[in-house]
Amino acid sequence: MSVRGIDRAALLGDVVRAASWLASQLAAARRDGASCEVHCATVLGLDVAALTLRDPAIAGTAQEAADTFAGALRAGGGQPRDAVAFALVAALHPGESAFAPARGALTAAAHGVRPLEAGPDACAQVLGGDDAALAALCDRIELRGVRGNLAARRELGLALAARAFSAARAPTRSAFAMHVLRAAAGARLDPATTAEALAFARRQQRVDGAYGHLPVSTQTAGDLRAAFHLPWTVAALRLVHDALAPVPLVRAKTSRQPEGDSPSARK
Amino acid sequence: MEPRTRVGEGCWNWLASNRAAFEPFREDDPLRSKRLLAYGELTGILGNCLRRGARGDALGALTAFVRAGDAGYDWEAQAIRSPAFAVALAVRARFRIAAGLADAMPPPALARHVALRTLDALELAPYRAFELEHLLAACGLGSGRRTRFDRRLRDALAILAKPPSSFTNHDRYALTHLVFALCDDGTRRAEAVAARPALARLRWLVAVCGRMALLERDLDVLAELVSCVRYLELDEPWLVEAAFALAAASQDADGSLPTFAEPPPGDAGRFFERYHATLMWAHAAT
């Protein structure tokens, strides 16, 4: 899909740089050890980059990252706190037994969930709910999509954009903002919002390929990079993927297609 | 009573009741410069509303009050002393035409500044520079300045080329003032002077920034954005209704609305904490 006003080639170039940064993070994680959280995010980021670019080499790196993550889990490294990310990784690597606890979590989460009806109530929920309620609403949009006419969908898109850009005033909430923008972009609610969301992500990319910035005076090494840049990078990559792919990654992984198929086949 | 009507009537009545506080002509007034600014804003908004055909007791009282300022101040002398005062002079000239007090002749001091190009040397924020070009054109002094008008518009749009999360308070007012000037305060279609892609982005920004202001309960800029919605002819019934509902719920019993969520430091009094938002909501409702 093309996004009006966005240079697709430049966007894909960003993804290549981000994948390169993630590969360097994988090397560092192997060398120095890392938490399950970091492993899980690294795998997911590389997988999303590989799907977006349809790049077998990056897919191979993602598989290596998944093997490392699985090894850490088997060694008793605990469980990632981000259940959705873990479930996505499990869905993207169906043959890996170490991810079994997370397998099926997405399908279970989608069970009984209905598409969101765009309209005044949904807009009021978006603008009035707390962060947790909004995150749940965005998950629902990603899982099941949005119903409504063009005007109501645009209205919902604008409400999501307002909430996201308001949150993004605080640097520590940019990953949350990208989640909200991803839901809007993935549901094709408003072309201008999608273009602005992608431009917002593009502006966050660092020279090394990671996304995001640290609070002033913070050291730029070790766990802090993982704590700040890694979630931002994965969030940005997922936003780019869902804006370009026919359906959001989460929905693709809960649909009836055979496990392991690319969720984002594109010409 | 509908929120829009209640907000409008309450605001106009408060402004009329408090019109003496806008009076900027007492030399010994320590708040004179603040009052002069407020008086200029009142003059501009009144002129806009009169040009769009608004009438009423409160508007009549305020019009008479501003008209009385003709005798209270040597406007031309101030414009000769300070070229930056050209903006106030142009706003006043437009008010006088709208109120039926003058024909379309530009003020001589303004024409002199244009002829001598002194206004081109002013250091103004891009949106202010565009506003000035718009005002000069509106005062009949735009001849030969079309290239400048287009360049100023480009410069004003350029500072908005960033995500709304990066907008400062200044940027949000730059957006609203740019729209006001583009649309000649609701009497011109923006398409007449701006290209479609630029307008598409302005429309998106107004729609999103309006919702952000609603979310952040920033009443002052919300009022200006509601006026932008109308001027750009956006189909935004939900936003406008929600904005007026918030304004009605925030309106004081005396009809005024607070400009700031937190009053700024210093004790300039209740009038200065409320006049701007009250004026802007009166404008938005009219």
Image (cartoon, rainbow, N blue to C red):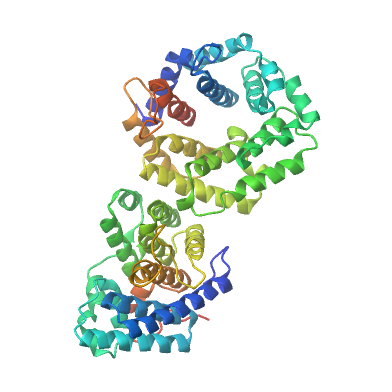
Give percent across and percent down for residue B1. 34, 26
On the question of residue A213 being in view, the answer is yes
**Lateral position of residue A69 relative to residue B109, left or right:** left
**Observer-nearest residue: B201 or B259?**
B259
**Observer-nearest residue: B13 or B129?**
B129
Give percent across and percent down for residue A98. 23, 87
> Who's the residue at 39% across and 65% down the image?
A219
Task: Determine whether A204 is above or below A100 in the image.
Answer: above
Give percent across and percent down for residue A153. 41, 57
Task: Determine whether B203 is above or below B252 in the image.
Answer: below
> Who's the residue at 54% across and 12% down the image?
B65
**Observer-nearest residue: B16 or A31?**
A31
**Lateral position of residue A163 relative to residue B199, left or right:** left
On the question of residue A257 being in view, the answer is no
Task: Determine whether B84 is above or below B28 in the image.
Answer: below
**Lateral position of residue A103 relative to residue B147, left or right:** left
Task: Determine whether A233 is above or below A74 in the image.
Answer: above
> Who's the residue at 46% across and 70% down the image?
A240
